[in-house]
């Protein structure tokens, strides 16, 4: 079933039975039948054409920082964009970037060119593509505020351009969560600013993260979406679940909105803990918590 895809790519672009725990920030996840690392956008187009024509299941991964892969792994092809599609250029007040570039690298490049508006992205460990899909944000800003347009590949192999207004972006939401489009690149529109001030702000954000977030442990960031007007961490803390653990999956003692992997947590541990928190939040406060994480693979 995988013969054609195996024959069309170089051996170093493919891994067979690759443990996905090696590719997620949670350090959790069973093996993918095939993991493919496209070197450029043409490679990505070729891979999608083959998957569509041969009816092969596939899943796009950026940096795997908002992902929980189940313990049985993935029967199909995981296409990791966050490894190679990393070209970008800063021109005047715009940044033209491929989807695999890390947000922190773009934030630093913006600062180096005295461009303001992207400071919030320092410390979000995702790729540009993943950040667009999630409308990632922090410190009162989000991707929506800095995007000019996005280029995305469809299952017919064509690349279309979308203006930010067409992406229906709101809190951790975009149209890309509901369609098959694959983000290949984006244009950021920033403003001229003062370099020292930008760098100071970024250092301050990084310090606040180190103080508040359990960065010493593997995690996938905030587990739950924030219900309107409610901070999830304090709610979980009030219910008394700070430090609560199932196996090696634990509600962080430092920030109750995070679940951390204390060493050998399985996806099953995390999913049980998520369910337990959801039940308690509903019973105690009538609050329905929905996971922010993308959950993929089989048990
Ligand atoms: C310590 C820590 C702190 C974090 N802090 C924040 C924060 O402050 N704010 C915040 O918003 N998030 C935060 N996150 C979560 C995460 O970093 C973001 O959601 C990030 O945008 C995910 O990007 P990614 O490349 O890792 O995506 P992945 O986890 O690889 O994928 C996420 C989803 O996007 C899809 N996807 C990825 N790339 C593409 C593409 N090119 N085209 C189409 N679909 C794609 C995947 O299929 C999946 O559904 C944090 C995570 C951690 C571990």
Image (tube, rainbow, N blue to C red):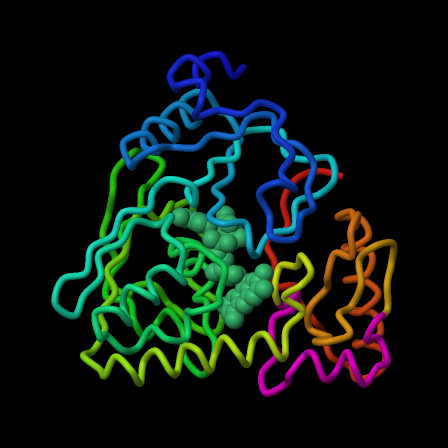
Q: Which residue appears at 63% of the width and 34% of the height?
A: 74
Q: Quadrant of the C terminus?
A: top right
Q: Is residue 92 magenta?
A: no
Give left or right: position of 75 versus 122: right
User: Furthest residue to the front?
Assistant: 196
What percent of the width, then of the height, locates residue 296? 63, 45
Q: How many marks?
A: 0
What percent of the width, then of the height, locates residue 192? 18, 79
Foreground residue, 50 or 243?
243
Q: Which residue appears at 80% of the width and 58% of the height?
A: 249
Quarter of image, res 22: top right
Q: Which residue appears at 81% of the width and 61% of the height?
A: 273
Q: Quadrant of the N terminus?
A: top right
Give left or right: position of 242 versus 13: right
Quarter of image, res 92: bottom left
Q: Which residues are magenta?
A: 222-243
User: Would you place residue 252 above or below residue 33 in this image?
Assistant: below
User: Would you place residue 179 above or below residue 284 in this image?
Assistant: above
Quarter of image, res 245: bottom right
What percent of the width, then of the height, locates residue 65? 55, 55
Q: Which residue appears at 56% of the width and 75% of the height?
A: 209
Q: Is residue 235 magenta?
A: yes
Give left or right: position of 230 versus 280: left
What percent of the width, then of the height, locates residue 160? 24, 47
User: Furthest residue to the left?
Assistant: 92
């Amino acid at each position: 079933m995988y013969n054609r895809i195996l024959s069309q790519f170089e051996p170093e672009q493919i891994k067979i039975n690759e443990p996905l725990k090696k590719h997620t920030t949670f350090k959790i996840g069973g093996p993918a039948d095939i993991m493919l690392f496209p070197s450029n956008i043409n490679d990505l187009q070729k891979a999608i054409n083959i998957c569509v024509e041969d009816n092969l299941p596939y899943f796009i991964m950026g940096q795997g920082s908002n992902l929980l892969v189940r313990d049985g792994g993935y029967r199909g092809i995981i296409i990791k964009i966050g490894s190679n599609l990393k070209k970008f250029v800063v021109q005047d007040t715009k940044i033209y970037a491929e989807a695999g570039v890390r947000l922190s690298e773009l934030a630093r490049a913006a600062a180096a060119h005295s461009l303001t508006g992207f400071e919030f992205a320092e410390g979000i460990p995702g790729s540009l593509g993943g950040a667009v899909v999630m409308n990632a944000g922090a410190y009162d800003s989000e991707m929506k505020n800095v995007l000019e347009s996005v280029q995305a590949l469809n299952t017919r192999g064509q690349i279309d351009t979308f203006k930010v207004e067409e992406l229906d972006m709101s809190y951790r939401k975009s149209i890309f969560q509901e369609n098959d489009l694959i983000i290949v690149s984006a244009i950021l529109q920033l403003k001229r600013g003062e370099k020292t001030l930008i760098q100071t702000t970024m250092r301050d954000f990084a310090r606040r993260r180190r103080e508040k977030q359990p960065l010493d442990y593997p995690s996938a960031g905030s587990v739950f979406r924030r219900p309107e007007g409610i901070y999830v961490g304090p709610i979980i803390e009030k219910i008394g679940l700070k430090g609560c653990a199932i196996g090696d999956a634990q509600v962080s003692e430092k920030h109750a909105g995070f679940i951390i992997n204390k060493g050998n947590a399985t996806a099953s541990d995390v999913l049980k803990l998520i369910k337990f928190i959801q039940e308690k939040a509903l019973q105690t406060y009538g609050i329905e918590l929905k996971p922010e994480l993308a959950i993929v693979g089989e048990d």
